[in-house]
Amino acid sequence: MRLSLGELEVFLTAEGLEEAPGGVRLWGREVRVFPPFPAKGFFRHGWQSWSLAAWVDPAQAPTPLLPEARRPQADDPFLLEAGAWWGSGVGALRGPDGRALLLGALDLGARVLGREDLLLGRYAEKGGAWFLAYGPEEEVFAAYARLLPKRLSGRPPRVWCSWYSFYTRISEDLLLRVLDEVAAFSFEVFQIDDGWQRALGDWEPNERFPRGMAFLAERIRERGLRAGLWFAPFLVTADSPLFQKRPDWVLRDEEGRPVRAGFNWGRPLYALDAGNEEVVEWAADLVRKALAWGYDYLKLDFLYAAALPGAEGEARYRKAMARLREAAGEAYLLFCGAPVLASLGLADGLRVGPDVAPYWDNEERSFWLADPTGPGLRNALRSTLHRLWLMENVHVDPDVVYFRTRFNLLSPEEMRLQEALAHFTGFKATSDPPSWLLPEEKGRLEAFLAREVPVRRLGPYRFRVGEEEVDYAPLL
């Protein structure tokens, strides 16, 4: 059928359509939209927090991400193995005048293919609704976002997180010392990250936390801060006690083999079956246990595991995470490594890019292995910048800001790029222990936490932050 979108006339195939604010609503398991121009770019939206979100050249085929063992934790594996530019849930073509033709799913479990002459949307299982719009990029993405679920509760908290300074090498004594330092600054949350637990799936404190997690939460609250805790509720490894005790809880393929969930911590990862009622209740009990210990800021990580093998698992993921949301009550939930569109309306905060790191890029991984999802500030900035349109739906977390020069390869200009983005999203966090900071760095950290700097977007990659103009385009 032929359809006019303002000045643009397209041909499309769909089971039905009707007008919608800012565009039209389509129906069908598969819809095809044929633009009257050869597209200059395709907005490729990755599946989960760490997956690539960026404008790509539709005429140039994607390079396969290596090694294959990492693909399940990098993106929807289908997207990485299709040999064409497929994205998750939403895609757009850029016309010769710079305007965007956007096709976005309004239900779960969709993928979008972009070619120079085609936008193809397809649901993995049953059919659903779509949104189609044409116009300035910022306007069509905003119109799409208004049709998606939202959960916004005030401004994001100011967070100190243990990960990007100590990684897994944390202990009760170390964190108590850092807590004394952090309490002197305008933080609101002291979040304990990976390294406190006995094993994945064994969410009890290890020997480095002899007085337990409730003790630490009480010490944190005594300093006037909210206590935060990390865990990955749907992830296990073959050597974890839970994997050995409950093999029936492990997600398996049609032949009964455990489904691979990636590779991290030097070993293969596996997923718990979020479609198993016992697994979901166990995960909800983890949330309730953390609340009982005194933690009301929870960073739930590697959540894609609950939705594997990809778009096909999003409905299962959504149902399971709704149970965890219910168990959490009014606690703040930060979703990380999470299917992005399927998390809206459930997460308070949502990581929208890969991990940052105290360096710009790991070229051995990003270039030679064609992996844009690994830690590094360049990767984090790129995907975050291309997901800012979600800011009216959820607290967008660009990850932590660095102020330290100690143990850090980033230049002052590179650190400033991340700081400006945190000002824009309002999600302000760092992992820098104050004792690692020079006096002027401490001053910058306190100003970052305490001051609200006026920020205005001047273009897709240009921002005015206070009196300074920041342009990301030359570096990305």
Image: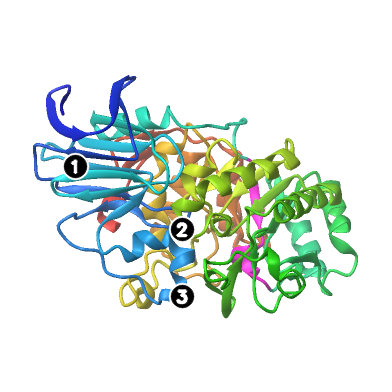
Residue 138 horizontal/vertical position (percent): 31, 33
Write down the quadrant of residue 261 in the picture.
Answer: bottom right
Q: Which residue is mark 3?
A: 69
Q: 372 above or below 23?
A: below
Residue appearing at x 63%, y 69% in the figure: 167
Q: Secondary structure at mark 1?
A: strand
Q: In this rendered view, identify the residue nearer to me: 326 or 377.
A: 326
Question: Mark 1 is on which residue type?
Answer: Arg
Give the vertical position of 363 relative to 458 (above or below). Answer: below
Nearer-N-terminus badge (3/1): 3
Eye-nearest disc, 3 or 1:
3
- Measuring from the top left, give residue 154's x and y in whole percent: 61, 30
Q: Disc 3 to disc 2, how far (Cα)?
A: 16 Å
**Is 129 rendered above or below residue 373?**
above
294 over 272 or under it: above or below: above
- In the rendered structure, find residue 50 and report the number of the disc placed on it: 2
Tell me the quadrant of the picture where the N terminus can be found.
Answer: top left
What amino acid does circle 2 point to? Trp
| Residue 222 relative to residue 41: left or right | right
Rounded to the nearest angstrom, the CA distance separating label 3 from label 1 is 33 Å
Label annotation for residue 94? 1
* Residue 440: mark in rendering: none
Q: Earlier in the sequence, mark 2 or mark 1?
A: 2
In the image, the segment drawn in magenta is 157-168
User: If you read the primary sequence from the N terminus, does the residue marked by circle 3 or circle 2 appear first?
Assistant: 2
Residue placed at 48% from the left, 47% from the top? Answer: 340
Helix, strand, or loop for circle 2?
loop
